[in-house]
Amino acid sequence: MRPTRFLAATFAAFEAVVVAAVGVAIPLIPLTILWVTTIDSGVQWDVYYRAAADIWLLGHGVHFTVTLDPALAASLNLPSIAAPFLLSLAPTAFALITFLMAMRLGRRTVEAEVRIIGPTSAIVAFALVSVAIAFSSLDSAVMPTLWRVFTLPTLIFIVGLVMGARGEMGRSGGRAENVKQRLTLWTRTLSPQVRAWFRASLVGGLGSVGILTSVAAVLTAVLFITRFPQVVALYEGLQAGAEGGAVVTLGQLAFLPSIVFWVVSWLSGAGFALGRGSWISPAGADIGPLPSLPIFGLVPEGQVAGGYLWLVVPVVATFVAARLVRSRLVANVYAQERGRWMLATAVGMAVVAGLVALVLSIATSGSVGPGRMSDFGPTPWVTTVWVLGGTFVVALIGLLTPGRSAVER
């Protein structure tokens, strides 16, 4: 290996370590500040480190089995709190940070012309560090699911790395360029109709979910503004002090991507749960008691004005996505075959949108405690069915609606 390639591979591995270190540092720094300000409490710093490491792992989909100390469990006086329970609701901001930083690293490794050894060294380094983080924070009271430790953080990193390298691989020469050329030659053996169908299905399905997610993000911001007094009241009720309030705020921000998708699930009509037996959807809300966390101040009391009229939002999002991909699809299919290709594209868009909804539902749902606290977020199969069915119907209408292009005349 040439010295320059060796150095580039070393730097790639170092940057992968930095990606993991930054993720752990985000919860560790405020927890360390909290430790310094409450140093007379007798709690050692390693407790805060284990908490930061567990938060980072939880954010990457690692589940934990929690067993509380009997004295603490008795003092809490909650049903089933003495028995081991599952902690699985992920603060997904950590996975998002890893994914975005891995994308940047993927571009850099390919630009440095270390097409194989660079990404490989980065993946190995990240995998070793993530496993080291898990084993350095092991505690009999909070035990991670080991197969998730060995797979999920590294898988998220690999997906980000590949996505980042994808745009540069074809220009980097060598083996990567040969792979791209072979893939291009293979796609050219397919008919123009199949290529147009595949592109329309993929772009249309992703576009539909993307537009809906953008609207959900705006609605989440509006909720923060309109429900701000309720959020502040819950902060005051916590009486956590400045340091504790800052830690609570950062913890809630880590769940912000999950909250945005909960709004997506709500807009789709499927809704989501805030505890077992509760449900929040456009039809109404049955919530029940919730922990006194400020973030729950965003949840409106009673039925939201408009009810199922909010389903117009995913309908418009899917219709717009279908219209955006329609013209190119029409230009590549024969007029007498247009109907069946439109039907196939509507099915393709629905499958793509449904798969995205399924993955995000699984990632943003889980348990935060025993009993009633074991069911938070959307139910994956329910959200998937609502998104898949709605996308298919609206996409078919959008695709079959005549346009004004010269091709159709």
Image (tube, grey):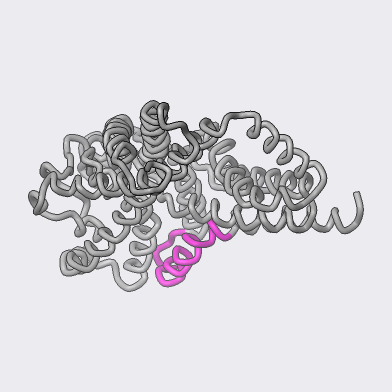
x, y percentage for residue 263? 27, 50
The residue nearer to you, when weighing 403 against 159, is 403
Question: Above or below — where is 136 with respect to 150?
Answer: below
Q: Determine if the magenta segment contains residue 134.
A: no
Describe residue 227's horizontal placement relative to residue 364 as left or right: left
x, y percentage for residue 268? 25, 42
Q: Determine if the magenta segment contains residue 34.
A: yes
The residue nearer to you, when weighing 52 against 99, is 99
x, y percentage for residue 378? 29, 39
Would residue 287 be seen by someone viewing this image from the given angle?
no
Residue in the image at 50% along x and 60% along y: 45
Q: Which residues are magenta?
A: 22-43
The residue nearer to you, when weighing 55 against 142, is 55
Viewport quadrant of the C terminus: top left
Location of residue 69 by image quarter: top left
The residue nearer to you, when weighing 285 against 386, is 386
x, y percentage for residue 94? 48, 53
